[in-house]
Structures are given as C-alpha cells and as structure tokens.
Amino acid sequence: MSTLALRGPARVVVLQHRRVLWITGALALAGVVLLTASMWWNSGTADTYADTGCSFMDTSPRCVTAFQDMLSHQAWLRDVLHLAGIAMMILPAAIGLFVAGPMIGRELESGTYRLAWSQSVSPTRWLLAKLAVPAAITVVAVPVLSAVYAWGRTSPDTDREAWYDTTAYAATGTLPTASALLAIALGALAALLVRRTLLAMGITALAYGAVALTLGAVRDSLWAVSTVVTPLNATGGQPRDSLWVGASLVAGDQRLPRDICDPGPVADMDRCLADHHVTGTYVEYHPASHFWPLQLVGTGIVLVLTAVAVALAFRVLRRSHG
C-alpha cells in the first residue's frame, strides 16, 4: 500500500508500522512462491511415472527409483499444503494480536495517542484509521492467499484433506477473510477495554479462539443436512467426499438410536434388530455441494459478530474520551 496515496491518520498508521507490513508482505509472498513452486514440481508426477511403463509390482531398480521419486514429490506437496492450511488458520488470530498489541494497545498504554489527538485528529478518526488500514490489507491479501491454497488443493497427484476437514475448511472460501476482520475488531475492542498491550493480546486470543471453536462445533447445523435410507447390510449410502453427521436405525415409520442394539455376538445383534423390526439405516450427511452454503452462513455470523465488536469499540472510545 503506497503511503503517498494516503492522507491523515491512515498514512501515519502505515508509516508507524511499515516495517511489520513489509515483513508480513514478504512472508505472504514467500508462501505463495513456495506453494506455486511445489505445485509446479509435483505437476504430472503420476503421468510421468505412468510413461515409464513401470507398475507398482515391478522391482527393477529403474522402476523402484521412479516410484520413490513420485512418492517424494507427492509427500512434499502434501506437507506444504498441510502447513499452508495451518498458517491460514493462524493468520486471523495473528492479525488480531497485532491490532490489540503494537497497533492500539501499545499507544494507549504509553499515552502516545495523545499526540495524534492534539493534531486535530479526533478519537473517532484515530480509531477508524487503526481499523481501516489492517482491514483494507486483509480484504485484499487474505482472499489471495486463500485462493492460492485452494488452487494447490486441486492437484490430482496427491492425497489431500477432505473439504470438511478442519484445516481445509477454515482456510478456504470466504471464512478466512471474515475471521480476520473479526480478529481485528476483537483486538481493537480488547485494547480499548484494558489499555494494556499484553493483556489485550491475551484477551483477543481467547475471544477469537472461543468464537472459532464455537463456530466449528455448530458448523454441521448451519445448513439442512441431506439424508439417505439404506437397507440393512446394503452397500452404498452417503456419497463419497461427504461429511457424515449422524445415523439412526429405521423401524417402520420410527427412527431408533444406533446403540439400541449394543455390539455383541452376531446372533444376538441380529435377534435384537429383528425384535425391533429394524429394516435399514437412516444417515444424515453434508455432501460436497454444501460447502458454500455452510461457508456463507458461517461467514454471515462472523461478520455480524465483527459489526457488534466494532460498534462496542467505538462506544468504549466515546465513553472514555467523549
């Protein structure tokens, strides 16, 4: 972000933290380059191995070397994707800690904010700039990082986490950007409430973690599940790449708990099922097509919480310095 195009408090914020912003940008660029290079290095490894004419049962030195080379490429990309997903999960919290600590908390604790307010900058404009700068960077950078990560997961040459896996789900779609904005709002609110750098950072981490864990716990209930009934001992059921939510036994028009017949000898199990007139299994699941509905509902909840936190932050500021 060019400081020449900025005016007033926003330009001051960028100048104050330009070193951190440069380092952050460099790390983000390094991550994109690493993932892109890994994708390029891994591209077509399965096709390259197939072109050798070798099979998995071939133990000739040439084929063993080619097979190990393919596995090493795939393992490397899998590890890079896993680390990238973890980094994307941590990123919103890191942004919130930066806002709660160096950006706002430190100024309130040291009293340097008074200098800005004495330069015809109102407390509201001061806080607005503190929020606007990281928010603007977030809505530009985080979607790019998330898109690169999602592109990396499209590689057909390696096993990857399912769409509903905690890491993959939290690092793709619209949720990472919304989560980062929430962390910014929570960081500002915590800093204004306690006016202590380390304490504000700790509160921000706890608050954001609580929201993330709660949202993860209720994620499966944010959208109506799909259902399927399969006869007992039948194959099939829920589609592949779907998230299992729950299951019960079907007895006529009734649904019975799965554990109504405790595991035991096969004969006892069959007798129990027959006594309860069980005819099939009722399965609840989220297919892959539910990714975006779940994401968008979760994003909406996070954005509402963000708006509430921002409103509370300005209210605290007005009460303290109105």
Image (cartoon, helix red, strand yellow):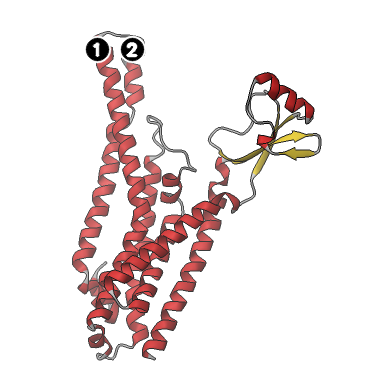
Image quadrant where one finds the C terminus? bottom left
Any part of residue 284 in sight = no
Where 28 sits versus 48, above or below? below
Q: Which residue in the structure is indicated by mark 2?
A: 54
Task: Assess whether mark 1 and mark 2 are in contact (beta carbons under 8 angstroms).
Answer: yes
Any part of residue 147 in sight = yes
Q: Position of residue 109 (x, y in %)?
A: 25, 79
Q: CA distance from mark 2 to mark 1?
A: 9 Å
Extreme left residue here?
A: 19
Residue located 65% across and 42% down the image: 226
- The quadrant holding residue 252 is top right
Mark 1: amino acid: Arg
- The quadrant holding residue 96 is bottom left
Mark 2: amino acid: Cys
User: Which residue is more in the foreground, 196 or 183?
Assistant: 196
Where 97 sits versus 28, above or below? below
